[in-house]
Image (spheres, rainbow, N blue to C red):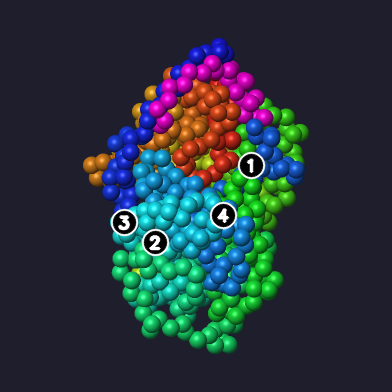
Amino acid sequence: MNSSANIIFSVIVACQLGCSVIGGSNLRQAAANQRGPADQVTVALPSVAETIAKAQANCVAEQKSDGTWDFPSYLGSFYVSQYLLFKQWIGMSDDPGQIQTHLKFLLDSQRSDGSWFSIEDKIVGTGDINATVWNYLFVKKYQEQSVTSKLISGLEIGRRLTRARQWILQVGGAEEGNMLTKMLLAASGAIDWQKKIIPIPTLILNDNSMFAESWNFGQWVGPHLKPLAVLRHHKFVRSIGVSATSILLDPDFSKKNIPRAVSAKDEQRTLRFLMPLQQPAGSWGGYTLATMFNIMALTTAGKMSLEDPAIKKGIKFIEDRYFANGAANHLGATQDGRYWDTILVGQALLESGAKQESLIAAADAVVRVQSKNGGLAFGVDFEYAPDVDDTAEMITFLQHFGSRYEAAIKHGEKFIYEMQNSDGGWAAFAKNNTGYGLFKKNDVSNFVLEAFKDSVAFFDESSPDVTGHALEGLGLIGQTKEKSKVVQAAVKYLKVQQNKNFGGWTGRWGVNFIYGTSAVLVGLHEVKEDMGAAYIQKAVQWLKSVQRPDGSFGETTLSYFVGAGKNEQGFAGKGYPTPSQTAWALLALVAAGEARSESANKAAYYLQAELQKNGKWTDLSTVGTGHPGIVYMNYPSYPYAFPLLALSKYQKAQ
């Protein structure tokens, strides 16, 4: 690869075969082939150094004036549809500009079968029920505006709506949506709160209750479920200006579903229950969806006005994410993750040879928001919940500066030590957040878990990817397997968690086995584990086995569903090729001492060819995981950071 300048490299990817994979909430048919576009492109590749220089320039061009990077991650346009529909529910007026822009976005992104994706996985041949329900209702409500503004003809809008409605009914109706969809449909009067929506005991959600410690939810649960518990308790119903009856197979709204009156005691209890969760920038918990739920509850049960400063601040947080967020507008950017973006892009630039002086502003910005306990948060309004993943990557970033940020690194190191779970691994936000406790013996509590299992992961347990990142950070500052009991416990945890059939590790926050295996192998390398060990070589051989002929790697979200019994491997490591997943695999190969292997060379060639062909790296299929098997995310920062990082490490290892 040292003499790779002007090498002719053929990027061969074959056309994707159509497949119907997921309808409603059920897995129906596995994709028979995971190949990409049917173009054969021949390009003259620049050298690795030239590719790195171009990638560096792409990163620098996106840097903010304060030194940070902010590539808003997003979860799907239907979150914006929900918000625009429920603006009427909370008494807000429509914004014509928001409506028109969102209509155009939805009409442009609707699939030929009438459905919509949430976040596109190119191997999944059909849309998402929750996304399609809310996007359908939005287009239905504002269809006349799309016609009068000449976005689409009246005849065509009718056809589009018919196809969407037929698709929804074919997969089981809006009833097939997850519990969050059902609750919002109940709030709009489409289905019966009493018959269809389980009560959520507020006691077990109360941080001050005797159940709080034993219930032990993940960080993301309370901000969403607390306001929903209030809405369900009072059975609030208001109009969103459009009926969902036509997309229900079993419309059973009952006139007995009368909202419960709100007493002065209820009002004060709601305020005490919900207001402490509001964060400085206006969100509840850092999330737009949780913020909308809380505003709904507070303007009803809490009797707060839209003019209340807290409510106005919350609305501004939502609208800034959805409509004033650059390239992420109307995509459903439900949170701010700028600290995560900054440390990823920053370390990629430093690893690739950028001068330290050019990254000091970024490092200073990160250190300024480091929490008192030493942790770093994901982004704005997450400062109340610093996490291990961000803290570990912060250490990986800051250690490039030598002793300049020694105090911050030591503080972060202490945070990571204190967050290690009893099983030896690390989770994201919490310690020993497995849910074990009194609720295990509580039938009501378990009923709640069962009802919401299609909407949220409840607990924040150890994961191989976070553990791998923690080891990477610790290893880079001198903590090794030989001398650290903390590291030894983590290595033991990783050995237990390895898939015994094919050798990979699952990914909690990235799709999926490629992400997890990469994080683990990089972490083990940094703590001086023997990379020739049999269990590590098993993982390496698995990675090589799932590499595509053109050198790329890709993995579908279906890998979270298929992985049991006779088909243990299933879709693990298989899917549409992406630069980020290819970079993760290349990082793993380099860490395992395979930098000069044919597999590593081919992966590097693919990354070079992709940058040459497109001018920048872009993931055309989702690689980010919110909740495995439930919610996925697009992280636009990933194809900026990870391929640059991988090629830089690859070049150094030649």
* Amino acid identity at mark 1: Ile
Label 1: element kind? helix
Count of number-bearing discs:
4
In the image, residue 49 lies in the stretch drawn in magenta: yes
Q: Where's residue 26, x and y in %?
A: 31, 53
Give me the C-alpha separation between circle 2 and circle 4.
Answer: 33 Å
Which residue is label 4 attached to? 149
Which residue is label 3 attached to? 171
- The label nearer to you, 3 versus 1, is 3
Q: Which mark is residue 343?
A: 1
| Viewer-side residue, 307 vs 572 | 307
Label 2–label 1 contact, CB within 8 A:
no
Residue 5 located left or right of residue 491: right
Q: Is residue 401 placed above or below 442 in the rendered structure?
A: above
Give me the C-alpha separation between circle 3 and circle 1.
Answer: 42 Å
Label 2: element kind? loop
* Amino acid identity at mark 3: Val
First reached walking from the N terminus: tag 3 or tag 1: 3
Chain part drawn in magenta:
36-57
Give me the C-alpha separation between circle 2 and circle 3.
Answer: 13 Å
Q: Which mark is residue 178?
A: 2
